[in-house]
Image (tube, rainbow, N blue to C red):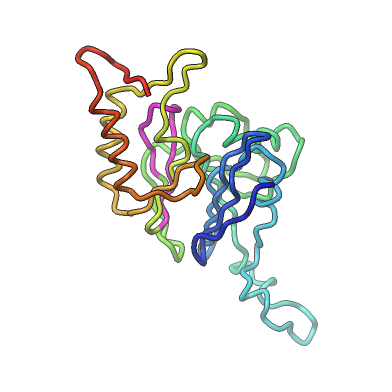
Amino acid sequence: MPRIIKLTDRIQYLQMSNDPLSADVIAVRGDRAWWIFDVGACDEAAQFINALPRIPVEEAAIPVDENGANLAACNNAARLAKNVVISHFHRDHLLNVQRMCGGEISLDIDALYVGAYTSKTFGEIEGVAKNVVMESLSFDDGVQIQILPMPNSHAKGSLALIVDDFVFLGDATYPMVGHGAPDVYNVQILGEQIKLLKSLTPSRFCLSHKRGLVRDKTSVIQFLESVYARRQKNENYIVA
């Protein structure tokens, strides 16, 4: 059973699972919205997202008025939206959106932010805005939020979510899966990725499917540089 882990007062996540394979699901509480990174593939991930409260706890506790109405609940401004950022199109990160499209489950969400390639893997969802991210987007929501296209060998059109000192990368530091052939990194893309990661200010990089989500920025970059150092002249790929 996946466990819910608290990273900060504003950030929590549901751990990944292996049966079925389902990515870590991150939930960041802003002042106006939840920012959810990936939706996973298991029922527990959907339940985790649906259970995120629409009314901030501190406002839900406000006493009722003389008519018995909760003043915070009556104030639309107090209602937290739920914005979902999908890291990439692989099933373990995305399937619950596809299950929602097929009517198998319900997800309590308001907006999706996806890369262009991911956008092709599911249709429009009534009542849910689909935003295709082609360049960096930034939001001030009590925490600093940035949605950033991330060059990588693993999956086309990947996105990262930056929240204050954390960079949530999904599978973006992993190689292209060979499906019977060796897993590989694309030399050109890996070089671009290292350059971009080095330019980021946050010091904590978060990698899905790892025991302990959070990694030190330096160690992640050092690993990628060690792979890049093995590139060979006139070779487009590096075996992982």
**Above/below status of 199 relative to 28:** above
Count of numbered badges drawn on the protein? 0
* Viewer-nearest residue: 119 or 199: 199
- From the top left corner, tell me how far across and down residue 155 is, in percent: 45, 28
At a point 55% along the width and 26% down the height, the residue shown is 120
At a point 53% along the width and 53% down the height, the residue shown is 35
At a point 29% along the width and 48% down the height, the residue shown is 200
Q: Which residue is outermost to the right?
A: 67
Q: Which residue is outermost to the left?
A: 233
Q: Quadrant of residue 92?
A: top right
* Viewer-nearest residue: 215 or 112: 215
Does the image show residue 50? yes
**Above/below status of 202 relative to 239:** below
**Above/below status of 206 relative to 182:** below
- From the top left corner, tell me how far across and down residue 186 is, in percent: 33, 22
Q: Is residue 80 left or right of residue 205?
A: right
Question: Is 155 part of what is drawn in magenta?
Answer: yes
Does the image show residue 146? no
* Viewer-nearest residue: 134 or 57: 57
Q: Is residue 176 left or right of residue 71?
A: left
Question: Is 23 part of what is drawn in magenta?
Answer: no
Quadrant placement of the C terminus = top left
Q: Which residue is outermost to the bottom?
A: 66
Q: Which residues are magenta?
A: 148-163
Q: Is residue 237 left or right of residue 44?
A: left
**Above/below status of 58 relative to 234:** below
- From the top left corner, tell me how far across and down residue 177 is, in percent: 47, 22
- From the top left corner, tell me how far across and down residue 235 is, in percent: 26, 13
